[in-house]
Image (tube, rainbow, N blue to C red):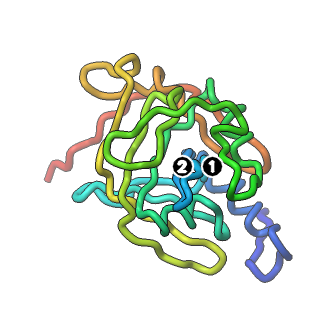
Amino acid sequence: MRTEHTPDDLPGRAFYKLMTSLVVPRPIAWVSTTSESGVDNLAPHSFFTISCTEPPIVQFTSVGRKDSLRNAEATGEFVVNLATEPLQDQINASGTDYPPHVSEFDALGIEREASTAVRPPRVAGSPAAVECALHSTLRLGDSTVVFGRVLNVAVNESVVVDGLPEVTRLRPMARLGRNEWSTLGEVRAIDRIPYTP
């Protein structure tokens, strides 16, 4: 037996809560931007993925018009910092609705690190950062998908094995439903099965 719902059945944010409890786990884009007036913003966005491999493009979704979206549109730049287990409390705290003139870096004591290709800073404590130029945005209802062309990827050598980031060293966090977060858990390597006619 199943319970069934349509978007019309559940009022307000109830359907959103249902969907975010089902589409799990979701990687977190910890997005840093800089406003036109020079304020460094930092916020987590749990609708995040790779959009294209050639050219390399990543995307995150701003539900509503958040500072990350406004700054990226105004300046054409943003950085996706890897959201990791040791930084979970800071990541969560940076989701507080600070006013635009308040920098989450300053309010929360998060150390900055200069980016190589863009103005917004990286999070110094994050083991990896993806520096992006704004490619485009797509408005969908109450949300905006932000696409960024990857200009530079900076990875701490301590998490690299055989030339690539190693996931158990990265220790990424993921968002689940409600106020739930997830750590990595069990990792299994499964090779693809080639088609044999």
Extreme residue in the front direction: 37
- Residue 139, compared with residue 69, is above or below; it is below
Question: Residue 192: horizontal and vertical position, in percent?
Answer: 29, 41
- For image coordinates 63% across by 29% down, the residue present is 87
- For image coordinates 53% across by 26% down, the residue present is 125
Real-space CA distance between mark 2 and mark 1, rounded to the nearest whole angstrom: 5 Å
Report whether 166 appears left or right of 100.
left
Q: Which of these two is toward me, 131 or 179?
A: 131
Q: Which residue in the protein does label 2 denote?
A: 31
Q: Which of these two is toward me, 191 or 163?
A: 163
User: Image quadrant of residue 142?
Assistant: bottom right
Q: Which of these two is toward me, 29 or 4?
A: 29
Question: Residue 78: horizontal and vertical position, in percent?
Answer: 45, 53
Question: Residue 38: horizontal and vertical position, in percent?
Answer: 54, 53
User: Image quadrant of residue 182?
Assistant: top right
Give, as a three-letter code, the residue at label 2.
Val
User: Image quadrant of residue 191?
Assistant: top left
Q: What's the mark number on residue 43?
A: 1
Label 2 close to label 1 by CB (< 8 Å): yes
Extreme residue in the left direction: 197
Extreme residue in the top direction: 158
Q: Which of these two is toward me, 122 or 3?
A: 122
Report whether 127 appears left or right of 84.
left
Question: Residue 71: horizontal and vertical position, in percent?
Answer: 54, 62
- For image coordinates 34% across by 58% down, the residue present is 57
Q: In which quarter of the image is the N terminus?
A: bottom right
Q: What element carries label 2?
A: strand
Q: What element carries label 1?
A: strand
Give, as a three-letter code, the residue at label 1.
Ala
